[in-house]
Amino acid sequence: GSVMTSDNYKAFAYVTTNVRYISLIEDEIASDNPQVLKSHDNDLKNLFANIHRLYTDHLLNPFASPNSKITSKRFDLGVIHLADKFNGR
């Protein structure tokens, strides 16, 4: 959920048992519309859950090392696709 708000940005966090995701997002939604804000927060939660699924799939690869940099093109393309979908592209 939302962990910090400034004039133009919002910081969001998604925490699982072993992983923490933090994202800084340019905020263009008026805060006086709670229905739209709730929908946006749900979209972010889904985005984080899908990125976590990609990460878990990557770790299930027997050749992946849990404590090393992710160099998987499949993971990179998956995150790019999810971000583009979230941004309405």
Image: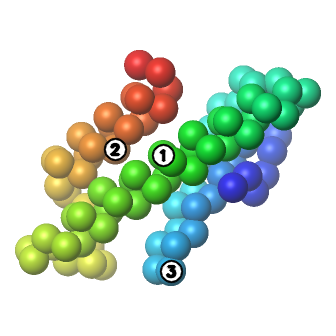
Circle 1 residue: 47
Gap in angstroms between the C-alphas marked 3 and 1: 18 Å
Circle 2 residue: 79
Gap in angstroms between the C-alphas marked 3 and 2: 21 Å
Q: Quadrant of the C terminus?
A: top left
Mark 2–mark 1 contact, CB under 8 Å? no
Circle number at residue 17:
3
Q: Which residue type does callout 2 highlight?
A: Val
Which secondary structure lies at badge 2? helix
Say above or below: 27 vs 56.
above
- Whichever of callouts 3 and 2 sits on the residue coming sooner in the sequence is 3
**In which image quadrant can residue 9 be found?**
top right
**In which image quadrant can residue 38 be found?**
top right
Q: Position of residue 60 (x, y in %)?
A: 19, 73
Which residue sits furthest top?
89
> Which residue is painted at 48% across and 32% down in the image?
86
> Which residue is painted at 35% across and 60% down in the image?
53
- Whichever of callouts 2 and 1 sits on the residue coming sooner in the sequence is 1
Instruction: Compare residues 39 and 65 and report the one nearer the observer.
Output: 39
